[in-house]
Image (cartoon, grey):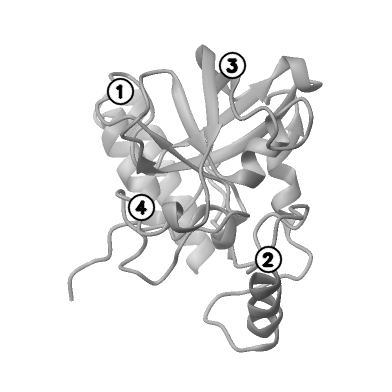
Amino acid sequence: MARLSLLALLATIAMAGASGVLASSDAAQALEAADVDEAGNVMQYINSVFGDEDDDDYSEEELARRDLMRRGKHHHKHSRKTKGKQHFTIGTDDSDQLWDDAVKITWYASNDLKNPQCGNGGGKWQPENSSHIGAVVKGWDNGPQCGDFVKLCNKKADNKCVKVRVIDKCAGCKKGHVDLTKSAFKKLAPSGTLNEGVVENLQMYKTYKPNPWDIALFGPKLLQALNN
């Protein structure tokens, strides 16, 4: 029955859009309410706990805490073998749309990641160095806003691309600058390390939200907690 209801909703959206009755923003809101992705597939949420499993920048304390969390009980579906690797790709997808072709990236870490300005689900989640999130300047006209997903690609690093979610504001940034977590930055740096500090002339694309959605990588769906 749930599948039939979803198909009926999508059919209604399609017919209304074709007739011009339903605005594109209304269609997007309807899809969001149905909790499906842009292709109409039901969203899946996982929590890998450790985010980017390729990241090797964990302290002993973080490693111990992650091990404890893996053995504990959680409220979300978990996977020891996260599907997050699909977000670390070579090149772009046909659905990606170029947003800016000269973006600069830097990185920030640890305590500076805590309590992002866009929200963190009412304090139920905090970004880690192994998350894939970014911060941008407030008021970037026609740029990414809170909650947006972007794909960043570096042609000088074998055209590696990383999907990140904007969840914070960067006071020291200007337009065309994205401040990233360590793990996301290293994926895009030619050296594969933090040594560059700054990498310029990356391409930034508008991209679909991930499905499945790894909460450890991108945070909760709702950044701002709903008032009870």
Name which residue type carries label 4: Pro
Q: Residue at x 65, y 23 (%)?
A: 153
Q: Which mark is residue 140?
A: 1
Q: Which mark is residue 59?
A: 2
Question: Which residue was labeled with disc 3?
Answer: 200
Q: Give the image location of residue 23, x and y in percent.
A: 26, 29
Q: Earlier in the sequence, mark 1 or mark 2?
A: 2
Along the line of sight, which residue is nearer the eye, 21 or 124? 124
Q: Give the image location of residue 118, x and y in percent.
A: 31, 49
Q: Are marks 1 and 3 in contact (CB under 8 Å)?
A: no
Q: Earlier in the sequence, mark 2 or mark 4?
A: 2
Element class at badge 2: loop
Is residue 207 visible in the rendered structure shown here?
no
Q: Is residue 3 above or below residue 131?
A: below
Task: Give the spatial CA distance, label 1 vs label 3.
Answer: 18 Å
Element class at badge 1: loop
Location of residue 121 (image quadrant): bottom left
Task: Give the spatial CA distance, label 3 vs label 4.
Answer: 24 Å
Instruction: Classify mark 4: residues with Cα within 10 Å, few (<14), some (14-19) or many (20+).
Output: many
Instruction: Classify mark 3: residues with Cα within 10 Å, few (<14), some (14-19) or many (20+).
Output: some
Q: Residue at x 76, y 55 (%)?
A: 56
Q: Give the image location of residue 102, x and y in percent.
A: 53, 11
Is residue 170 visible in the rendered structure shown here?
yes
Element class at badge 3: strand
Element class at badge 4: loop
Instruction: Classify mark 2: residues with Cα within 10 Å, few (<14), some (14-19) or many (20+).
Output: few
Task: Give the spatial CA distance, label 2 vs label 4.
Answer: 22 Å
